[in-house]
Image (cartoon, coloured by chain):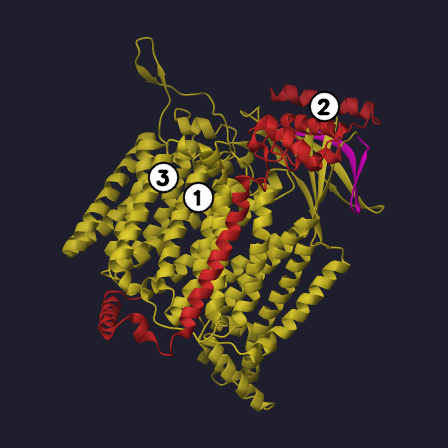
Chain colours: A red, B yellow
Amino acid sequence: MIKAKRMAFLFALVALAAAPLVTAQVGYSQRAKAIGMHLKCMCKGCDMSAGGCAHPGGAFSGPCDTAKAMLKEVDAHLAKGESEQQIIDAFVAEYGTVVYVEPPKKGFGLVAWLMPVFYSVVGFGLVIFVVRKWAIRPHGAGAVAAGSAGHNEAMDRARAQAARETED
Amino acid sequence: MDVFGSFSLLLAFVCAVYAVIGGIFAIRTRHPLLIKSTRQAGIATCVLIFLATISLEYLLFTDNFSLAYVVSHSNRDLSAFYKVAALWAGQEGSLLFWSTLLSVYVLSVLIAYRHKNGELMPYVGVILAGVQLFFLTLNNFVENPFKTLGVMNASGVLEPFTRMDGNGLNPLLQYPEMVIHPPNLYSGYTGFTIPFAFALAALLARYPGEKWIHLTRKWTMVAWCFQSLGILLGAHWAYAVLGWGGYWGWDPVENASLLPWLTGTAFLHSVMMQEKRGMMKVWNVWLVFCTFLLCILGTFLTRSGVVSSVHAFANSHIGPWFVGFMMVILLVCFVAYFKNRDYLKSENMLDSMVSRESSFLFNNLLFLVACIAVLSGTLFPVFSEWFTSNRISVGAPFFNKVMIPIGLAILFLTGVGPLLAWRKTSADSLKRNFGWPLLVGVISAVLAFVMGYRDGAAMLCLFLCGFVTWTIVLEFYRGAKVISARTGMSKMMSAHELAMRNTRRYGGYVVHFGMVLIFIGLAGAAFNTEAQKAMSIGDALKLGPYTLVLQSADTKAEKNYTAQRMIVEVLKGNKQIMMLYPEKRQFQGNEQAAGTMVAIYSTLREDLYVVYAGMDPEANVPVIHAFLNPLVKWIWLGGVWVVMGTLLALMPNRRAGLVLAGAPQPSTVPGEAVLHTQNIALREGHD
């Protein structure tokens, strides 16, 4: 099998040398590739964008046939004078929301964008709250923090026990 | 040998059961003989797991194609080098590999502490054996790597069957880095089990919060170092083999490896709060619990075949086992915490919002936000399907947009944090410490602009890189100046001496510098360009300052594959720079898949990354895909610094007295030396 492929490849190389002036193009426009970066390759094998599909492990290092067909479809939409958003919407209508490379900033997709903002704001507020709480306590507040003198004794006992039972 | 391996695994399972159940009794009864026997059962478990792994490797090396695992992941012509890697190529083997690496840690702990920490070790032993037991259950009863092939005869009886040859190793794994990347990453994942076990054990034994930190400091750093190296090697493999021009695609597996790294890094910082100021004890315990849980989640996502689709989570037959295990861990952690949380109370307070303490809090906040953002982004497709019945994909552009601001904020804190004093920092000290670094930052940004790197985020990143670098330089310079004044050594020797006296602190700075280099490399991604062309012999492709000329092509036949190789001449202006040889490999036994060998001309300024994509199906000519990726080399250099810094931090501190004894007193500017000596003495007290 490999030998046959090797022969075919050598044959192709001979053909190349005989026709050095032939220069093929990749079959889709740069604009289609740029829009394809916002569309997921639907081959279900590479999990990359159609514009950036390198199809790792495939016989051809991207775009795979599916991605290439999608990019040609983008070109067809462009020829009709459609905008980038219209083209993306047309693909969503065809394949569903799974074709998005990044969630849309509308509907449920907006949640994905808002979540990190929400964590950051809540976390930031929490840190400010904690630092202020720590900062307003009086100096030498160990006793206050530990709760009571009784608790401190318990901690001291636990510490002594830990020291007895471990060595490092 | 397959029976031997299978039996070793079963015996290891029995020993682990004994180590857990006997260990619980040993804790309750404190019977010395029972404690000793359960520890020995723990050691036996590790040894038996090693024997099982050795038998699987033996079966791979001897081409035993009666074993299903060997058939699926090896073939006769596979080189010995990759037969080692076949151990973790499939799910069954990789789960065994997890157990093996965990056993290395467990055995080290059990032997190193056999005469130490008498009361704590039974708890640690039970927890470690519990984790081993989970993986041994999978190894024995769910994903056994020693299953043999069978064929049904005419009378309906299953007979052993041996194949002539195997299917071979996945071509994507037949690359040298794949032999070292997974062991590193797995050593990171498994290594975090040790701080987890000690944290939980100390909580169960009602030790005050600081004890376990003290015991596991170095284990945590080792795990973190392996995890960092594993992630970087994975990124390098993706860059050099997948042929897509990038190194990080934010796919679920990559994200899974990043999650415990983020919480682990947060922990390495917040642990200092506990050591120096007795604060954040609860937080640290939960950070370690979460890091371990994320390691388990990461292992599951990586090895369960759910790579391409997180939704397959529910369909994978090992999924429920992992979910169950994580639930059990969470339950145990909650119970232990709520029962003994009084032993984790904080004791110290701070005086100002502007202090080292608050910078650590913000550091932890940012790492946690980064972790949750990556986790929620990774799982968002599943959430969207649950809530709306429509699956919404989340790819690299989303993660880039969310993570760039968080990354830059972390980088900012990398520079600011170490220069703030504990408890309170005065405005005067802020001015003194930050003036020069800010200036260097501005110069870096201006230089970037002049050199053509004109992108807002990238320039901000390079500004921060300059800023952080100078804060690190200042830290070394000030310390070295004091030592130099006291000992008469040169500044360079003094800086070395300084680092050796407080390895953890200065090792940390070296790691920070490594991260700066990595960030410089990441900033370069804003300026990537590419070109693709179907080319005949003699054709040229222009990309940036380079011209690629396809000179010729050939094939080479190796034992396990045949490569189609393009010979590409690289010109810069009219000057020949070098020849590049990108190739496409067709492996035996894997006719459907092919391997890509990217050819890279790498300089500090940029990488010229050339891929032979394959033959154009329409024109039947080779397609060359070239990328110009600025500054990528800085990422790999940064990785080297990160590892060196961690190794430095792991070294014991050298005692100052050894050097200072007999050192000549400087005759010049004594006042300054005294002033700085006081300063350094104060600073060396905390890192």
Q: Position of residue B386 (x, y in %)?
A: 44, 35
Vertical placement of residue B213 versus B235, above or below? below
Residue B27 visible in image: yes
Q: Which residue corresponds to mark 3?
A: B322
Q: Nearer the viewer, residue B512 or B391?
A: B391
Looking at the rendered image, the disc whose residue lies closer to the viewer, 3 or 2, is 3
Task: Sort mark 3 into few (<14), some (14-19) or many (20+) by Cα contacts within 10 Å.
Answer: many
Element class at badge 1: helix
Q: Of helix, strand and loop, which mostly describes the magenta segment? A: strand
Q: CA distance from mark 1 to mark 2?
A: 45 Å
The quadrant of the image that shows the N terminus of chain B is top left
The residue that label 2 is drawn on is: A10
Q: Which residues are magenta?
A: B537-556
Mark sitting on residue B424: none
Q: Is residue A127 magenta?
A: no
Neighbor class of circle 2 (other Cα within 10 Å; few <14, some 14-19, many 20+) is some
Host chain of mark 3: B
Provide the secondary structure element on which disc 3 rests: helix
* Same chain, labels 1 and 3: yes
Q: Amino acid at mark 1?
A: Gly
Query: How dense is the environment of label 1, judged by Cα within 10 Å: few (below 14), some, or many (20 and up)?
Result: many
Badge 1 is on which residue?
B298
Disc 1 + disc 3, Cβ < 8 Å = no
Q: Chain of mark 1?
A: B
The one nearer the camera, B85 or A148, is: A148
Mark 1 and mark 3: Cα distance apart in space: 11 Å
Instruction: Tell me the amino acid under the disc marked 2.
Output: Leu
Q: Is residue B42 above or below residue B597?
A: below
Number of numbered tags placed on the structure image: 3
Please provide percent x and percent y for residue B71. Answer: 44, 26
Residue B541 is one of the magenta-drawn residues: yes
